[in-house]
Image: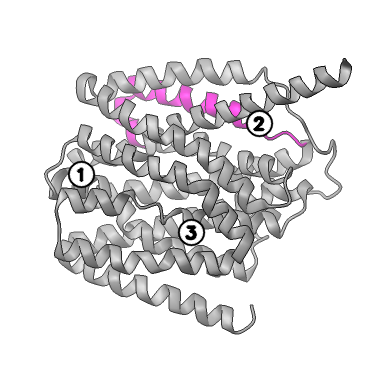
């Protein structure tokens, strides 16, 4: 009887966490996907790129300050919910402090993103096949992105950004408090090694730095893609939400398979598979700039062939008692390169034009895989 009760409790806890991952995906969709459309109205393409870069950097660095504490205590889910609560409160505050709305939104999105490396740490600690674990997490967070893209697109279209922010914030506060009550299964009680923020920042291996630089290639376009769709291809915000809905649907389906591919062929080869897509992506948009082709290409989930192996790699090279530190460190590197790619993409469009942007992006997307292939061939 006791064993059956324990089994049921574990099942309830597991499905509660899957639900939390999905809801979390809904919440991070709002500041990540729609913020740049909001910014473009006030500052143009360079402001959009700079906000993307600032947001990417803050999202990368915020978990670094929490991961040593998470490693020390063994708590992952609890700290994730605490920062969902803090991020939601800040989003609500942005309504009354309109002069500071952009920096507040950036900080809020960074606090919300603390959850991602902690959730990945929790999942990979419980499975030797870390690629499949990361893939499983991305299934549920992408389900959240799926509904968030459509939901926020509809709400913004009918009620505007201010009302959407209020709805978003209040829901986040309630949900984070509810999930704080979920009992977390910790693998260990005390970390045998003392981790610090300084150690977290300098725990990167050269291979982590090299592999994560691949993020620059998609980040070139990620920084301007909402503005590109709405203002260059003459789409609207609701259409942009639907495009993201379609893209995320394919990502939900592909996530677990990409994770299994990582476990089967390894991180290096999976990264190279992902890198093949981007020269084709940029080349096609250069010659065929229309909404349908853009939506089709954007829906192909090749970004997963970069993100999942990177997070899997950080889990593979770390022990469970330092997992959050290493995953957060990879998250930080991804944030750095996303930020750099975003600024670079915005500057190219600002000082040249969209055609020059695509030509240079094609060139960079060809050079990066060659660079990584050479690095791998040297036995690294």
Q: Nearer the viewer, mark 1 or mark 2?
A: 2
Q: Residue at x 19, y 39 (%)?
A: 42
Query: Is 306 located above or below residue 169 in the figure?
Result: below
Does any portion of residue 245 appear in the rendered image? Answer: yes
The scheme the figure's colours follow is one colour
Question: Where does the image place residue 178, in percent across and percent down from the top left?
Answer: 59, 15
* Element class at badge 3: helix
355 to 83, vertically: above or below: below
Quadrant of residue 235 within the rendered picture: top left
- For marks 1 and 3, the one nearer the N-term is 1
Is the residue under label 3 in contact with that under label 1 (CB below 8 Å)? Answer: no
> What residue do we see at 40% from left, 52% from top?
301
Marks 3 and 2, how far apart in space?
A: 25 Å
The overriding secondary structure of the stretch rendered in magenta is helix
Q: Residues within 10 Å of mark 3 (few under 14, many from 20)?
A: many
Residue 108 seen in render: no
Residue 47 picture location, percent across and down: 25, 48
The local secondary structure at tag 2 comes to helix
Q: Which residues are magenta?
A: 74-102
Q: Nearer the viewer, residue 287 or 212?
A: 287
Q: Is 158 on the left or on the right of 13, as rendered?
A: left
Residue 62 position (above or below residue 360)? above
Is residue 77 found inside the magenta-colored segment of the image? yes
The N terminus lies in quadrant: top right
Does the stretch in magenta take in 3? no
Query: Which residue lies under the disc numbered 3?
Result: 306
- SS at mark 1? helix
Residue in view at x 36 percent, y 70 percent = 365
The numbered mark at residue 43 is 1
User: Dot 1: within a 10 Å radius of its alpha carbon, few (fewer than 14), some, or many (20 or more) residues?
Assistant: few
């Amino acid at each position: 009887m006791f064993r059956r009760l324990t089994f049921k409790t574990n099942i309830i806890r597991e499905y509660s966490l899957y639900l939390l991952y999905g809801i979390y995906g809904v919440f991070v969709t709002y500041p990540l996907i729609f913020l740049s459309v909001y910014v473009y109205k006030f500052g143009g393409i360079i402001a959009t790129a700079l906000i993307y870069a600032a947001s990417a950097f803050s999202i990368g660095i915020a978990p670094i300050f929490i991961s040593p504490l998470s490693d020390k205590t063994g708590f992952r889910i609890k700290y994730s919910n605490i920062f969902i609560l803090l991020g939601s409160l800040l989003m609500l505050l942005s309504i009354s402090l309109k002069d500071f709305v952009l920096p507040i939104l950036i900080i809020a999105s960074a606090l919300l993103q603390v959850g991602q490396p902690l959730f990945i740490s929790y999942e990979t600690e419980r499975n030797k096949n870390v690629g499949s674990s990361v893939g499983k997490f991305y299934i549920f967070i992408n389900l959240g992105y799926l509904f968030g893209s459509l939901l926020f697109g509809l709400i913004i279209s009918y009620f505007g950004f201010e009302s959407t922010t209020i709805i978003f914030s209040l829901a986040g506060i309630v949900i984070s408090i509810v999930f704080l009550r979920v009992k977390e299964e910790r693998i260990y009680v005390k970390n045998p090694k003392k981790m610090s923020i300084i150690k977290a920042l300098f725990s990167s291996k050269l291979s982590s730095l090299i592999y994560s630089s691949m993020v620059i290639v998609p980040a070139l376009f990620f920084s301007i893609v909402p503005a590109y769709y709405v203002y260059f291809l003459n789409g609207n915000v609701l259409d942009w939400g639907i495009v993201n809905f379609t893209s995320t649907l394919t990502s939900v389906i592909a996530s677990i398979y990409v994770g299994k591919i990582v476990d089967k062929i390894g991180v290096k080869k999976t990264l190279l598979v992902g890198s093949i897509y981007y020269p084709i992506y940029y080349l096609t948009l250069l010659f065929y700039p229309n909404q349908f082709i853009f939506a089709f290409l954007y829906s192909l989930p090749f970004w997963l062939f970069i993100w999942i192996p990177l997070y899997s790699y950080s889990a593979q090279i770390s022990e469970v008692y330092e997992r959050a530190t290493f995953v957060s460190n990879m998250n930080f590197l991804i944030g750095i390169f996303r930020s750099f790619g975003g600024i670079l993409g915005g500057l190219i469009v600002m000082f040249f034009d969209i055609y020059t942007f695509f030509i240079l992006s094609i060139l960079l997307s060809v050079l990066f895989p060659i660079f990584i292939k050479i690095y791998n061939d040297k036995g690294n």
